Amino acid sequence: MLSIFILFLLILVMFTKQISINNDEVRKSDMKLANVDISEPKFAINNSSKKIYITAKEGNFLNKDKILLKENVKFKSHDFSIETETVIFDRSKQTAESKTKSLFKSKNSTILSDGFDIHDRGNKIIFYGNSFIVLK
């Protein structure tokens, strides 16, 4: 009988500790999200020949048109993808600019750069800084 009581107390302590850990994680997550205007934003750049879909983990409005996208920012189209950590996306001009390490991938090439600009509704991409290019 004593062993069952001790086992019950042990399970109760473990359960209480797990609940406390879960509550701490929820509080940390809530504090982080409090500084975010948009959680998991999704946008698209449209031009006559293709769409470029943009996703990120977080977004903050800089003004009416410009949005700072942060953490795991991805640009995807049928022809290529770009991954980086921070981008300023202008919704009205349909442009994007990054000054963080970026990885561009397409069927025939890979480019690792220090940043990029997307202009002309996605028809022009300019890569900045030290760039490493692999052509297939």
Image: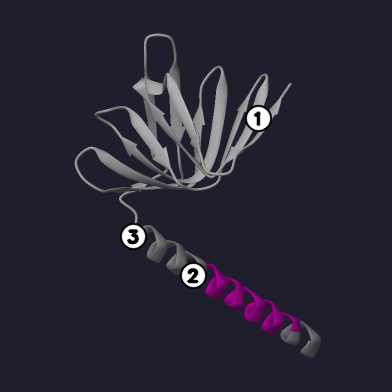
- Judged left or right of residue 54, residue 18 is right
Q: Which mark is residue 35?
A: 3
Q: Which residues are magenta?
A: 7-23
Q: Which mark is residue 14?
A: none
The alpha-carbon separation of the residues under discs 3 and 2 comes to 19 Å
Tag 1's secondary structure?
strand
Mark 3 or 2: the one toward you = 3
- What residue did someone put label 1 on? 110
Q: Residue 85, percent across and down?
A: 50, 47
Residue displayed at 74% across by 21% down: 136
Residue displayed at 69% across by 77% down: 11
Amino acid on which disc 2 is placed: Asn
Residue at the extreme front: 130
- Residue 52, by quadrant, is top left
Residue displayed at 39% across by 39% down: 41
Q: Residue 105, percent across and down?
A: 62, 28
Q: Please name whichever residue, 114 or 94, is drawn nearer the observer in this view of the structure.
A: 114
